[in-house]
Image (cartoon, rainbow, N blue to C red):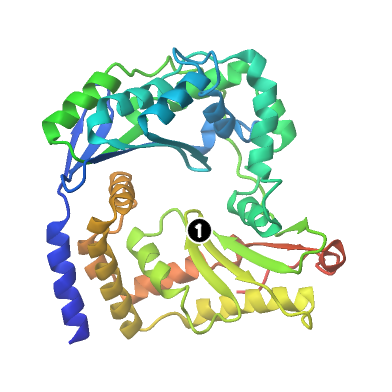
Amino acid sequence: MRILLLALLATLALQAQPRVQSFVLPNGLRVFHLEDHEHPLVRVRLQLDLKPTDTPTGLEGLSALALQMFQEPGSGEAKADDFDLLLEGSGIQFTREATPTGLEWGVVARSRDQDRALGLLAENLLRTVFDPAMLWRQAAACWRDQEQLGAPPQARLRRALAMAPGERPTLASLSAITLEDLIAFRGRVLRPERAVLVLHGDLGLEQAKRLVLLNLGSWVGSPLPPDKGAPRPPAAQEEHLNIPAPGTSLTLLAVTSPPPDLAPEVIALLDLLVPGDPLLPPVRATLEGYGLVVALEPGSDTTAPRALAILQGRLAALRQRGYTQVELERARSAWLARRSLDCLHPEALLAAALAEARGRGATSGPMQALTLEALNAGLRAWLDPHRLRTGAAGTPEILTQLAPQQPPTK
């Protein structure tokens, strides 16, 4: 009865969600529009995917440095200080983010400021000039930001493990980036046909078309730089990473990203099933943007090697056990209920629209057709020991106990 009630409420809420409408500009930019007049606000999210070949070997951190250089003085019509003053004076919220898989810009503004907001986005996105005098200073600042030197050791460890082996920026790789590298990167990546734009809020479809065409219709990709040959070779898997943290008790982390061919419906259900699994304690699990993160803070009477064995053992036991049909049905109902609440959270709607535009969003049809065998096969693939990266933060004395570990048996 409770499941039926949840399904009924979910169906009613889904019917209240704004309908997604889409169009494509002549330059290839794909736009998704969600009309919602409940509040006088407009939210905009623009996302560019990154490919492994976009960053040549030895230039790790190129995307993060390029994103910082886009906002430097001399890189566009508006200086960086003027740009910040415009934001402060208008109340427009503006964000930029570089992740291992893409670049993203976000804007939140009152509906009456939508023209100015999208104009500021276009101004920041389409800057075409880099100031060479700022390159070294921004490379050092980018390295400090990537290393998160002022953050707690656990946060630094989590960020380091989230990056694939060989993709973690170093001061040497950032310092090796030249002005020519930045221009070539911009030519490869900042192209309208590689972008997805999502608008949500107090504007109609025709209004959205006019707004996007006016501000981003003239966006054309730069001439593509010449292909430098063979694609970037995959980096060797790092088995374990230690971050010394004097005066800090031991924290163990393991991160595993989902296989690239894993169905988004499997990821969505494992997001619900794994974190609360009774088999995991004292290990804690969360699903974050870059993968599954499991953590263990052992007591003082547990040695570091023993704690690492506990963490790996809990994951191995979960992988071997899998889930039952009853657990699958409960998770499916919970997913439907959670999805029905997206209409109350505009940022969740934006994220869902972007995911579906990229072919990474879970949808109702495939979710209902998902079998227990597919769910457990996805769990086994995701928790494959060869995909697991572990790390530890603690005092140097504790970390010396963690000799290089042999890969756990399947």
The residue positioned 12% from the left and 30% from the top of the image is 206
Find residue 311 and report its horizontal and vertical position in percent: 64, 75
As drawn, 316 above or below 38: below
Return the x and y of residue 329 as percentages of the image width and height. 28, 79
Tell me where residue 59 appears, x and y as whole percent.
64, 31
Picture layout, residue 286 above or below residue 203: below
SS label for mark 1: strand
State whether residue 25 appears in this view.
Answer: no
- Quarter holding the N terminus? bottom left
Q: Amino acid at mark 1?
A: Gly
Q: Nearer the viewer, residue 69 or 254?
A: 69
Q: Is residue 31 left or right of residue 244?
A: left
Where, by quadrant of the figure, is residue 72 drawn?
top right
Q: Residue at x 87, y 66 (%)?
A: 397
Q: How many numbered discs sit on the rendered protein?
A: 1
Horizontal side of 31 relative to 21 (left or right) equals right
**What residue is rendered at 67% in x and 53% in y?**
156
Left or right: 309, with 13 as reference point: right
Name the image quarter holding the C terminus.
Answer: bottom right
Relative to 342, is 279 above or below? Answer: below
Tell me where residue 167 appears, x and y as whole percent: 62, 42
* Residue visible at 18% across and 74% down in the picture: 7
- The residue tagged 1 is 291
